[in-house]
């Protein structure tokens, strides 16, 4: 009887199945040899392990299960010998040394002791006797110290894993003596090497050559975090079988060589956090087998993405934290297998290619903190997408037209800090898996309207947009909501906090800076049923009282009720929030009882009570606070002598704008972590403590502001060599003496304001080495001498505000300095530049904004926030002379220029018209002559203040653009000026002749005898005086000597005052003797 061919195809797999099952039963039923069983029982007895957590060793029992080949983790050969032993994660803590029965199992081929806790014991050298091993895994087993050289005896090894995750181990394994080359010299058959976390500490040529010469068949090289260094040696390219290269977290400080593109079998390349630099070779991206590439966190690594081939295998593209740049190629849509993209914190630009919408396998997309522009493409085809993060780009357009409803697995959507506009689509609130929706800092507008169908949404941040209307009631239906931020919008109308009583999971609520009228209607159970909040921000919410539900809060960490209309005493229950970390009650009308116990806030870090009506004495301060601001209140007492004892943790401490009096306590010098000390605008007297100056040695101490007090004496010349000060503001005190020479040690100084004191010194050229100085104010002191510093390079290239007004400076305005002040010559369009303020950002991340004063139109104005592009140049009320340098037009970023009340002569330089940002120009009270250049009227289109009065200008006023808007007092007391707003009209330069005269007469030169007679008289008198001076030398010398003496005495006596006049006169007489 024949059996059909089809029947044979059906019958053969069944026979094969029974045959394999028979072999399996025979191998498992094979009894282990007694010596093997005894060795295993001995091993169990010698090991120390956790019997509660053990799943294998605990069940080794020769009485109940005499066949050890059936024990968990044990595998035998057909002869009954143990060949495989797997004790993975058995919580073994000890008992494994050179005497262990383990090393009697000579037939072992695979051994896995990974993920145990052997308490930093050294790897026993007896491992080298298990010469039949081809698989050895001791990873994360708790071993530490030098790896024994006997490991090199395991010549049959195919896989060696000695890797260690540092988080799972107290100490490290190391390969030093012997080194890597000695350890692997016999591993000719090795294909997989895992040494992650092992301290190898070898340079590039050493470890590369060791690998290339000993393990030619290596496929997996995993040596992350091994303290390897670079550069990569070319010998590494011999390992052509490499499929996986994982070298993360080694500090190579080198570029990636081009030969990496020659690893044709490469599937995974990990070089994250390696200090890579240079340009990454684009060809590596084109390796057809490449599935994963991770170059993240290499801050100096640059490159761009190439055109991708259609048949690429790439699944993970991780470039975050590099400086890769350029546009994304449209061909990125060819990477059909791509599931994970992380391009965050790079410099990519251009639009996001629409082709990315074809990446159907995409699961994770993070392209945050780049410069992408244009609209967001639709990702609706990526059905498995769980995260979209496009935070901090320049994306525009609307998102309501995109198809969101198909992204059923989307968990996180972050589009914050862009320029997206339009309405927020309600379909986002219907996504069933969505947990985080972050749309803050955009330009979304209109009303917020949606129906709730998502129960998983726990974070909703719509802050800093243009949303308007009432807050929708559907917000209160988001039962899973934990974080809600609607701050800085245009929401309006009444808002009852009681509605959140059903939001039992709510822990973070921010409704600040809207037009809401926040109310809380108290009922018998309302305060107790309100959810337990950890963060509550209700700044600028028109609150009249403290919300009563706060009395029953027990988990509050962060409370901001600033900029409201709350009157009366701060309630005592606030000081009982023992877990409070941040408290801001500033800008209210609050008072405080004298016995208030601020120190009860033992965990408080930020305490901001400024701009209230607090008075009396300063209360005892909380000991752990890092930020303390009591400024702009009515405290009226001396600063407590022991106040420094309460500032042990303080970074920023401000008592500004109160009525504190007395001296500055010495104990402030014990606040060793202090970064900002602001005692300005009080009535403090006495000297500045020397120890406060010496505090500049602390690397954190950046700001000392004691302006507007009554401090006297000299400034201690004890600034340390490691001075860290960035701001020193001593304006408007009673200080005298000279500018300390040691202040030149403060190389980080950006603001130095010593105006309105009694300092007597020359221009502080000894500070010229402070290259970061931006603000220098010496106004209203007794500075004298030239404003020129000797040397080849002019000082302070970053200077943006220079105020030397109301001193005794003399001499010309130096040309060289003008061209050196780069901050005043910046050609960047300030309208497009980023708005930044000059200030101090300490390690506590709290910003102190610098303050200074400028003078415009005779009015002194305080700038509470100095923009980094604001520039001002004020030399008024000195004795400067000579012409205004014609290169002054190079200062084309100036906003204010004041050269008034000096002795400048000559014409107004036409180059002043290049100061296109200038808003105030004052050249009054000088000896300037000539016409007003028409270039000023053409170029100074932003000018709002002009004063050219009290000069010797003449000619017509260019009555165009801004110059036609100024009043007569801008030009007064210039006898020769005419036209425009002045009553004096300009005469025609060429008066016309009567039309009846003969045409020939018009062509002949006419003689005006009146002018001729006057000119002849002038030149006759002029010749009688000048002639003898030219032809008689003795007369000439005597004449010039007496005239010079007369003018010198008159000038000095009138303008320099008595003491300086006599000193300079004596110096002049001494010079004459020689």
Image (cartoon, grey):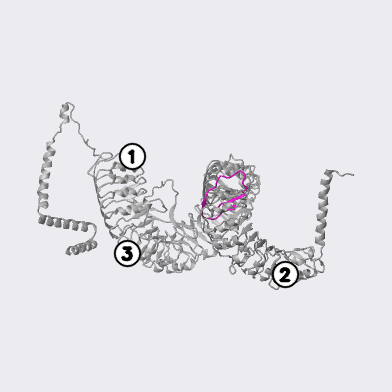
Say which residue label 1 marks. Answer: 961
- Counting from the top left corner in percent of width and height, residue 942 is at 36, 44
Marks 2 and 3, how far apart at CA: 82 Å
| Nearer mark to the viewer, of 1 and 2 | 2
Asked whether 19 or 194 is in front, the reply is: 19
Say which residue label 3 marks. Answer: 738
Vertical placement of residue 823 versus 310, above or below = below
Disc 2 or 3, which lies upstream in sequence?
2
SS at badge 3: loop
Which quadrant is the N terminus positioned in?
top right
Disc 3 or 1, which lies upstream in sequence?
3
- Residue 573, by quadrant, is bottom right
Structural crowding at the residue carrying mark 3, measured as other residues with C-alpha within 10 Å and reported as few (<14), some (14–19) or many (≥20): some
Q: Residue furthest bottom?
A: 99
Asked whether 395 or 116 is in front, the reply is: 116
Q: Do the residues bearing badges 2 and 3 touch, measured as CB atoms within 8 Å?
A: no
- Residue 32, by quadrant, is bottom right
Asked whether 452 or 429 is in front, the reply is: 429
Is 476 placed left or right of 939 in the picture?
right
| Nearer mark to the viewer, of 2 and 3 | 2
Residue 102 - label: 2
SS at badge 2: helix
Note whether residue 488 is visible: no
Q: Which residues are magenta?
A: 293-320
Is 956 placed left or right of 400 in the picture?
left
């Amino acid at each position: 009887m024949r059996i059909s061919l089809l029947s044979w195809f059906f019958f053969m797999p069944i026979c094969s199945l029974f045959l394999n099952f028979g072999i399996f039963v025979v191998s498992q039923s094979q009894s282990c040899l007694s010596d093997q069983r005894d060795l295993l029982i001995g091993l169990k007895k010698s090991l120390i392990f956790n019997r509660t957590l053990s799943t294998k060793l605990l069940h080794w029992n020769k009485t109940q299960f005499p066949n050890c080949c059936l024990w968990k983790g044990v595998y035998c050969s057909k002869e009954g010998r143990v060949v495989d032993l797997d004790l993975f994660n058995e919580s073994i803590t000890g008992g494994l040394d050179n005497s262990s029965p383990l090393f009697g199992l000579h037939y072992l081929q695979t051994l896995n002791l990974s993920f145990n806790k052997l308490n930093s014991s050294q790897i026993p050298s007896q491992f080298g006797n298990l010469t039949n091993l081809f698989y050895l895994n001791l990873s994360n087993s708790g071993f530490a110290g030098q790896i024994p050289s006997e490991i090199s005896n395991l010549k049959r090894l195919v896989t060696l894993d000695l890797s260690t995750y540092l988080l799972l181990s107290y100490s490290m394994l190391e390969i030093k003596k012997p080194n890597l080359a000695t350890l692997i010299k016999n591993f000719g058959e090795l294909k997989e090497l895992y040494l992650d976390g092992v301290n190898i500490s070898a340079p590039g040529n050493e470890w590369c050559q060791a690998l290339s010469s000993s393990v030619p068949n290596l496929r997996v090289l995993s040596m992350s975090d091994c303290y390897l260094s670079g550069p990569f040696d070319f010998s590494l390219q011999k390992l052509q079988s490499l499929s996986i290269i994982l070298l993360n977290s080694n500090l190579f400080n080198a570029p990636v060589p081009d030969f990496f593109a020659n690893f044709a079998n490469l599937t995974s390349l990990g070089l994250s956090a390696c200090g890579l630099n240079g340009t990454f070779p684009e060809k590596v991206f084109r390796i057809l087998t490449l599935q994963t590439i991770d170059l993240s966190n290499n801050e100096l690594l640059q490159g761009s993405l190439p055109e991708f081939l259609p048949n690429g295998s790439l699944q993970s593209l991780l470039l975050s934290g590099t400086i890769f740049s350029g546009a994304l190629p449209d061909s990125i849509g060819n990477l059909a297998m791509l599931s994970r993209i992380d391009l965050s914190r790079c410099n990519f630009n251009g639009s996001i290619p629409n082709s990315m919408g074809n990446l159907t396998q995409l699961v994770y997309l993070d392209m945050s903190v780049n410069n992408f522009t244009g609209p967001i493409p639709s990702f609706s085809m990526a059905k498995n997408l769980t995260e979209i993060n496009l935070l901090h780009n320049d994306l525009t357009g609307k998102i309501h037209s995109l198809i969101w409803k198909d992204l059923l697995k989307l968990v996180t959507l972050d589009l914050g800090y862009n320029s997206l506009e339009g309405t927020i689509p309600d379909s986002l609130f219907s996504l069933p898996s969505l947990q985080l929706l972050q749309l803050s800092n955009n330009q979304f507008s209109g009303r917020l309207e949606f129906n709730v169908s998502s129960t998983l949404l726990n974070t909703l941040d719509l802050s800093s947009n243009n949303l308007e209307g009432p807050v929708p009631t559907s917000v209160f239906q988001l039962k899973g909501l934990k974080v809600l931020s609607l701050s800085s919008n245009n929401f309006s109308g009444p808002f009852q906090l009681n509605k959140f009583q059903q939001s039992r999971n709510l822990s973070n609520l921010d409704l600040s800076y809207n037009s809401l009228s926040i109310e809380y209607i108290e009922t018998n159970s309302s305060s107790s049923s309100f959810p337990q909040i950890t963060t509550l921000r209700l700044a600028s919410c028109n609150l009249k009282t403290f919300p009563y539900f706060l009395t029953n809060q027990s988990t509050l960490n962060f409370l901001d009720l600033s900029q409201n209309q709350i009157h009366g005493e701060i309630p005592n229950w606030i000081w009982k929030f023992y877990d409070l970390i941040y408290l801001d009650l500033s800008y209210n009308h609050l008072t405080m009882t004298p016995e208030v116990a601020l120190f009860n806030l033992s965990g408080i870090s930020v305490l901001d009570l400024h701009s209230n009506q607090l008075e009396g004495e300063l209360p005892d301060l909380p000991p752990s606070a890092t930020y303390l601001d009591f400024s702009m209140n009515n405290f009226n007492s001396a600063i407590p002598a022991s106040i420094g004892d309460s500032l042990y943790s303080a970074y920023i401490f401000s008592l500004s704008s109160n009525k504190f009096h007395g001296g500055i306590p010495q104990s402030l010098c014990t606040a060793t972590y202090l970064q900002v000390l602001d005692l300005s605008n009080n009535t403090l007297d006495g000297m500045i403590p020397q120890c406060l100056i010496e505090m500049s040695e602390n690397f954190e101490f950046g700001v000392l502001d004691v302006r507007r007090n009554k401090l006297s004496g000299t400034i201690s010349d004890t600034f340390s060599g490691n001075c860290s000060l960035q701001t020193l503001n001593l304006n408007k005190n009673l200080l005298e003496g000279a500018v300390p020479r040691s202040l030149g040690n403060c190389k980080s100084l950006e603001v130095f304001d010593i105006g309105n004191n009694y300092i007597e010194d020359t221009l502080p050229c000894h500070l010229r080495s402070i290259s970061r100085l931006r603000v220098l104010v010496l106004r209203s002191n007794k500075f004298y001498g030239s404003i020129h510093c000797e040397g080849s390079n002019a000082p302070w290239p970053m200077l943006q505000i220079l105020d030397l007004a109301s001193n005794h400076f003399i001499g010309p305005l130096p040309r060289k300095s003008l061209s050196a002040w780069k901050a005043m010559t910046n050609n960047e369009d300030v309208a497009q530049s980023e708005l930044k303020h000059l200030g101090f950002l300490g390690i506590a991340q709290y910003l102190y904004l610098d303050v200074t004063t400028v003078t415009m139109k005779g009015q002194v104005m305080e700038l509470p926030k100095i923009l980094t592009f604001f520039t001002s140049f004020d030399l008024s009320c000195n004795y400067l002379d000579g012409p205004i340098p014609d290169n002054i037009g190079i200062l084309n970023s100036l906003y204010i220029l004041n050269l008034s009340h000096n002795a400048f002569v000559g014409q107004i330089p036409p180059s002043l018209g290049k100061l296109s940002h200038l808003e105030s120009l004052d050249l009054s009270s000088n000896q300037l002559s000539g016409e007003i250049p028409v270039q000023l009227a053409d170029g100074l289109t932003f000018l709002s203040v002009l004063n050219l009065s009290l000069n010797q200008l003449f000619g017509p006023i260019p009555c165009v653009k801004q110059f036609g808007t100024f009043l007569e007092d801008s030009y007064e007391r210039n006898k020769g000026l005419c036209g425009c707003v002045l009553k004096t009209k300009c005469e025609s330069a060429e008066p016309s002749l009567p039309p009846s005269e003969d045409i020939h007469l018009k062509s002949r030169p006419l003689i005006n005898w009146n002018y001729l007679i006057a000119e002849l008289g002038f030149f006759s008198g002029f010749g009688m005086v000048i002639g003898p001076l030219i032809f008689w030398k003795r007369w000439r010398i005597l004449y010039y000597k007496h005239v010079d003496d007369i003018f010198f005495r008159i000038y000095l006596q009138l303008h320099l005052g008595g003491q300086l006049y006599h000193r300079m006169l004596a110096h002049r007489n001494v010079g004459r003797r020689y």
